[in-house]
Amino acid sequence: MELAQYLRVLLKKWWVIALAVGITVTSAVVFSEVRAPIYRSSAVLQVVPARFDYGLGLSTEQFLRQFARQIHTTTMAQQVIDELQLDISTDRLLADVTVAPIPEDYLIQIDADRP
């Protein structure tokens, strides 16, 4: 086909293109209005051992799990609420926050999601 034939087909079927664009735009607007926005904040804490050896690596995994449990407590949540002057309960804050140790990299990942 030549370029002129393509243009002729497009001009004949312009309403199909306009309809497809209209449906796409309408769907995108409806989806973005209906879906509740989710806000996420992330932090990564790095734990650096004083010395590196195999035995320390095993105990570091235990320490990381313990640190993660200490971060995800009502006491720590209350400290965050007080310092940031948040209008939220400790239970709600703890429900929105996840704390995960990453032992192989000596890291603790903290994520806070809020719809």
Image (cartoon, rainbow, N blue to C red):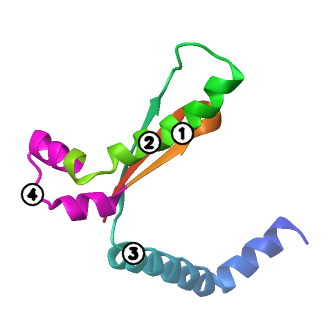
Whole-percent x and y of residue 40?
37, 52
For label 2, the residue is 66
Which one is earlier in the sequence, the residue at label 4 or at label 3?
3
- CA gap, disc 4 and disc 2: 28 Å
Q: Residue furthest top?
A: 51
Q: Looking at the rendering, in which quadrant would you find the N terminus?
A: bottom right
User: Regarding mark 4 in the picture, which secondary structure is present there?
Assistant: loop
- CA gap, disc 1 and disc 3: 48 Å
Discs 1, 2 touching: Cβ within 8 Å: yes
Instruction: Verify whether residue 87 appears in magenta.
Output: yes
Neighbours of disc 3 within 10 Å: few (<14), some (14-19), many (20+): few
For label 4, the residue is 87
User: Regarding mark 3 in the picture, which secondary structure is present there?
Assistant: helix
Q: Is residue 2 above or below residue 83?
A: below
For label 1, the residue is 62
The reply, left or right, for residue 12 in relation to residue 35 is right
Whole-percent x and y of residue 58?
64, 33
Discs 3, 2 touching: Cβ within 8 Å: no
For label 3, the residue is 29
- Image quarter for residue 33? bottom left
Task: Look at the magenta stretch and give its main secondary structure.
Answer: helix
- The boundaries of the magenta stretch are 77-97
Of tags 4 and 2, the one toward the viewer is 2
Front-most of residues 29 and 62: 62
**Residue at (40% x, 49% y) in the render:** 111
Residue 62 visible in the picture: yes
